[in-house]
Image (cartoon, rainbow, N blue to C red):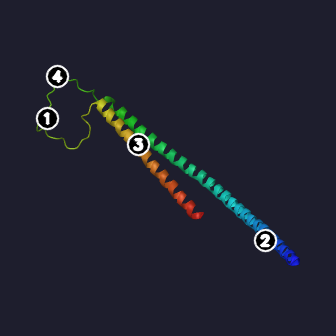
Amino acid sequence: MNRIAVYIVCIAIAVFGLFYLHNKQVDKAVNAAYTQMENESNKRLLTLMKKADAESIELKAKIKEQQDEKQIAIDDINKRHAAIVAGLRNRPERPTSQGNYTASTGNAETPKGATGIELSRPDAEFLAGEATRAEVIRESLLQCYRQYDEVKDAIQKFTQDNN
C-alpha cells in the first residue's frame, strides 16, 4: 500500500509539474502575442498620427488661403463703402424742420423704385454702412461654410483611406 501511495504522489507531482510548465509556456506565448499586437498597433497608430499631422498641415494651409481670400473680399467691400461715402459728401444734411412739417401720409403717390436719391447724407451713410456690414458678415459666413465643407470632406476622405 505504501508503494501505491508513493506512485500516486509521484504521478500527482509529475502532473502538477507538467501543468505548471504548460501554464508557463501558455503565458509566455500569450504575452509574446500581446506584445506583438501592441507593437503593431503602436506602429499603425504612429503611421496614422503622421498622416493626420500631414493632413492637418495641408488643411491649415487651405484655411489660411481661404482666410486671405476672405480678407481680400472684405477689403474690396470696405473700398466700395469708402467710395460710396465719398460720393455722398455732396448730399445735403437732413432738413431741419421747425415744426412746420407738412408731409402727407394720405394717398401720396409711391415713387417707382427706391433708389435712395432723396436720402439725406447721414441717412445714406448709415444705410451704406449697414449694407457694408451685412456684406462683411455674408462673406465671413460663406468663408465659414467653405472651411466647414473642406474640413468635413478631408475627415471623410482620411477615414475612408485609413480604415
What's the CA distance linking mark 4 and mark 1?
16 Å
Mark 1 touches mark 3? (CB < 8 Å) = no
The numbered disc on residue 119 is none
Residue type at numbered disc 2: Phe
Kind of residue at disc 3: Ile
Residue at image location 53% in from the left, 60% down from the top = 156
Q: Which residue is mark 3?
A: 137
Q: CA distance from mark 2 to mark 1?
A: 106 Å
Vertical order, 28 against 11 (above or below): above
Amino acid beneath label 1: Thr
**What amino acid is labelled 4 in the image?**
Gly
Q: Secondary structure at mark 2?
A: helix
Q: Earlier in the sequence, mark 2 or mark 4?
A: 2
What SS does tag 3 mark? helix
Furthest toward the top, the residue is 98
Residue 34, horizontal then vertical, whole percent: 71, 64
Closer to viewer: mark 2 or mark 1: 2
Which quarter of the figure is the C terminus placed in?
bottom right
Binning the other alpha carbons within 10 Å of mark 3 as few (below 14), some (14 to 19) or many (20 upward) gives: few
Residue found at x 36% / y 35%:
129
Q: Earlier in the sequence, mark 4 or mark 1?
A: 4
Horizontal side of 42 relative to 97 (left or right) equals right
Secondary structure type for disc 1: loop
Q: CA distance from mark 1 to mark 3?
A: 36 Å
Residue 28 drawn at (x, y percent): 78, 66
Q: Which residue is mark 2?
A: 19
* Residue 105 - label: 1
Q: Nearer the viewer, mark 2 or mark 4?
A: 2
- Residue that lies at the very extreme toward the left in this rendered image: 107
